Image (cartoon, helix red, strand yellow):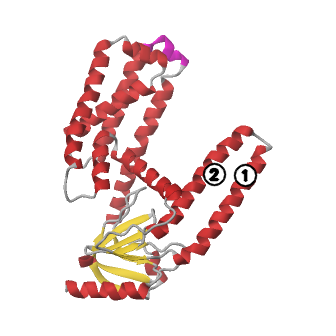
Amino acid sequence: MTAQAGSVVGRRQIAAKIVPFAIVALAGMAVRMPVVRAHPLPALLLFLWIVADTLMLSLVARSSGKPEHSAILAVLAGASFTVWLGSPPGIRGTLLEMPILVLAMATVVLGHVAWATARASRLVTRAGIDRKERWVAAASEFFPPALVRLAVAEMTVLHMALFRWGGPADVPVDARAFGYHKHLTPMCATLLILSAIEIAVYHLLLGHWSRTATIVMFVLSDVGFVYLVGLIKSFRFRPVLLTPEGVRVRAGFLIDQLVPLDAIAAIEGAFTGDEVRDATTLNAALLAWPNIMLRLGRPLPRRSFLKKRGPFVRVAFRLDDPEEFTRLLEWRLGLRV
């Protein structure tokens, strides 16, 4: 029952994030229909009402309680900006002929910017938080947090793929790193070679058929290849970490999960396939069978970018040097006792 309830909540949260974009996009297409040209004012007011109402309902659906005033102001500012940006020239001209409505929309946007600036200035100077997290939190005051996280992820992948070709891995000063990329190197190299061959073949075949299709495929395939390079390089630059707080299980950009020391009940090197494939197991081993499993004394929430999933009670992953990791973790757990 708990898993079913969590699944229902997860689907509702996904719907609350996706459906508003679809509704706003459909409304933006509707105001461009020929019939709207004869009735621009009703179309403008209807477009503004649909966008504001949709975004507000999405905020209510995603909030566990009563939304904060800052969130409501941000939604209204986002609706005003969306209507201005998404309106065709005829609708925008009608809007400019209504100075009261323009003033109200501008006041909402400026109010949101002023409020967000005040909150962001406090977040940037807050101590005890990583610098990157501070700036992400500050940017989330101005823009939707999901959009900010997506932009940060995009820039991180591109920076990893294009600019990081050497140097040490991302390891804090108080952490011990354990790699897992050696067993992935042959498979990743093969995957890159096959992707390069596939891109070349696509370009040659489509070049004789359609220039437009060739350009589109060039953009999609080359961007995808860059992302693939960034992902493969992230396996070396983002190892598994043993920190004073616990084990930070990482798999490149795909997984980053902290397992506190006080939640670890046992360390095992032998386990069954049913345990690895179980829904309550976080399997962080990539393209290989795991060689370490951490059994937890309590369930931990699972971090997931795409959807909300249930908690896990086991963590399985593969390391290049599992014996050293097991020895050091057992020593840390002995100190804890």
Q: Quadrant of the N terminus?
A: bottom left
Mark 2 neighbour density, 10 Å: few (under 14) some (14–19) many (20 or more):
some
Q: Is residue 263 above or below residue 224?
A: below
* Residue 60: percent from left, percent from top: 28, 42
Question: Is residue 3 in sight in this rendering?
Answer: yes
Residue at position x 38%, y 84% in the image: 325
Q: Report if the CB atoms under discs 1 and 2 are less than 8 Å apart.
A: yes
Q: Relative to 291, is 143 on the left or the right?
A: left
Q: Is residue 306 above or below residue 16?
A: below
Q: Secondary structure at mark 2?
A: helix
Q: Relative to 232, is 189 on the left or the right?
A: right
Residue at position x 62%, y 69% in the image: 189
Between the C-alphas of marks 1 and 2, the distance is 9 Å
The magenta segment: 34-40
Q: Quadrant of the C terminus?
A: bottom left
Q: Is residue 37 magenta?
A: yes
Q: Check residue 202 in the rendering and tell me which mark sits there, or answer none.
A: 1
* Residue 33: percent from left, percent from top: 53, 21
Q: Relative to 152, is 111 on the left or the right?
A: left
* Residue 162: percent from left, percent from top: 53, 55
- Magenta segment, principal secondary structure? helix
Residue type indicated by callout 1: Tyr
Q: Secondary structure at mark 1?
A: helix
Residue type indicated by callout 2: Ser
- The residue identified by callout 2 is 221
**Between residues 121 and 258, which one lies in front from this camera angle?**
121
